[in-house]
Every structure is written in structure tokens, then in C-alpha cells.
Image (cartoon, rainbow, N blue to C red):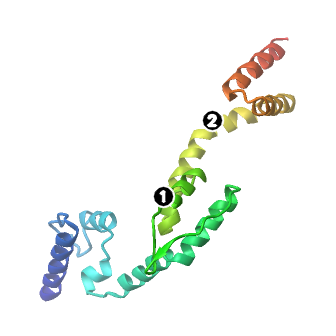
Amino acid sequence: MKTDMAATRERLEQFAEWTGTEAPATILDDEGAPTQELLAYARNEELCLDWLFLGDVRPLVQAYRRRHEEMSWPRVQERVDLLAKLADMEPIRVEVDEDSVLLTDELIAFCKEARGDIDWLLCGKDENVLRSHQSKVKETEPLVEEVKSLSEAERRGLQVALRIAIREKRSVEEALAAYSEVVEEERAA
């Protein structure tokens, strides 16, 4: 076991050197399980524990293949096409050089106009998309609850006020202020 732990410590130090990070001081706790410090380090630095403890590179190869597939031209083009469809835009053609997708000004502008996430578009990383969704839900929940508390007539009135604001190119705030006045008058009557 000593040799295995020596090899594990050596791999950990090598990984820390490669990533420019500081390796945790302890690897195992008193019960022989990975320390919380090591688990947090592995999670934050994307350290494969199979490789660390066993020297097994299969999970690394599989992760590399998945990552390479997500970043391949066909997958990036699929995401561009999907984003274009969702944004009701024409998709652009993704440019490639020696099997690598190029981050062009056109691709950046497309992503911005379509309100997409560049990490998702290029790498398939959906963490930012999920965080954005969670943030938007958290932000809109009070509004949704407020709208739910309106009567059916008040909801229809709100829809009309918003449609008028859009049609007449007025600010939403202006339309909501006028709508609120009418609702308050109706409730007071």
C-alpha cells in the first residue's frame, strides 16, 4: 500500500505542477477515505480520481473523446442551427481550420444577436445556460406570483396594456404605470 500511496502522491504533485495549483496536504483521512480537501480539489480542478489513485487513464480518454466530440464542427454547427431556429434567425456557417472550429467575429456577433452562450455554442458546456435559467426563474418568480394573484379581467387588461406598449413602441414601464393606475381605481371602486 505504501508504494501505491507513493505513486498516488507523485501523480497528485505532478497534476498540481501541470495545473499551477497547490496540491492538498493530505490525501486520505484516518478511515482511509479521500479527505474532503482532496475531493474539493478534485472537483474544482477536474482531477480524475481513477487516475490519481489507480493510474487508470480510461476515464481521461473517455472524457477527452466526449469533449472533442462536443467541440467538433458538426456538433457546433448543430448548436448554431438550433440557436438560429430558437432566435428566429438565419444560421451562419461555422468556419473550420484543420478540424478546429474558428472563433470568428461573425460567430461572436451571431451568438450575441441570438442571445446565446458562447461556451455552450463552442464547447457544449451548459452550466452557464443552466445558471442563467435559474437566475431568470428566481428573478421572475415574484412577478409570476403577482400575475397569478390578478383576476382574469386584470390579466386581460395587462395583456392589452403590454400589446399597446409594444405596438406604439412605448416603454413597458410606462404601460405598466398606466395599467396600475386603472387597476387601483377599479379596486378602489
63 displayed left or right of 52? right
Task: Give the residue at x 30% y 68%.
Answer: 42
Dot in front, 1 or 2 = 1
Mark 1, secondary structure of its residue = helix
Query: Residue 142, labelled with which disc?
Result: 2
Find residue 175 and report its horizontal and vertical position in percent. Answer: 73, 24
38 displayed left or right of 150? left
Please indicate, yes or no, whether residue 28 appears anywhere in the rendered image.
no
Question: Tag 1: Cα neighbours inside 10 Å, few (<14), some, or many (≥20)?
Answer: few
Find residue 163 and report its horizontal and vertical position in percent. Answer: 80, 34
Mark 2, secondary structure of its residue = helix
Find residue 35 and report its horizontal and vertical position in percent. Answer: 24, 67
Quadrant that contains the N terminus: bottom left
Mark 1, residue position:
105
Using the image as rendered, state which of residue 47 and residue 34 is in the foreground.
47
Please indicate, yes or no, whether residue 111 appears anywhere in the rendered image.
yes
Tell me: residue 4, above or below residue 183: below
Find residue 14 and report its horizontal and vertical position in percent. Answer: 17, 76
Of the residues shown, which amino acid type is indicated by label 2? Answer: Pro
Query: Marks 1/2: CA distance?
Result: 38 Å
Tell me: residue 180, above or below residue 68: above
Query: Residue 150, labelled with which disc?
Result: none
Task: Give the residue at x 52% y 57%.
Answer: 117
Of the residues shown, which amino acid type is indicated by label 1? Answer: Asp
Identify the mark nearer the N-term, 1 or 2.
1
Question: Tag 2: Cα neighbours inside 10 Å, few (<14), some, or many (≥20)?
Answer: few
The total number of labels drawn is 2
Location of residue 63 by image quarter = bottom left
Tell me: residue 133, above or below residue 93: above
Task: Give the residue at x 55% y 69%.
Answer: 94
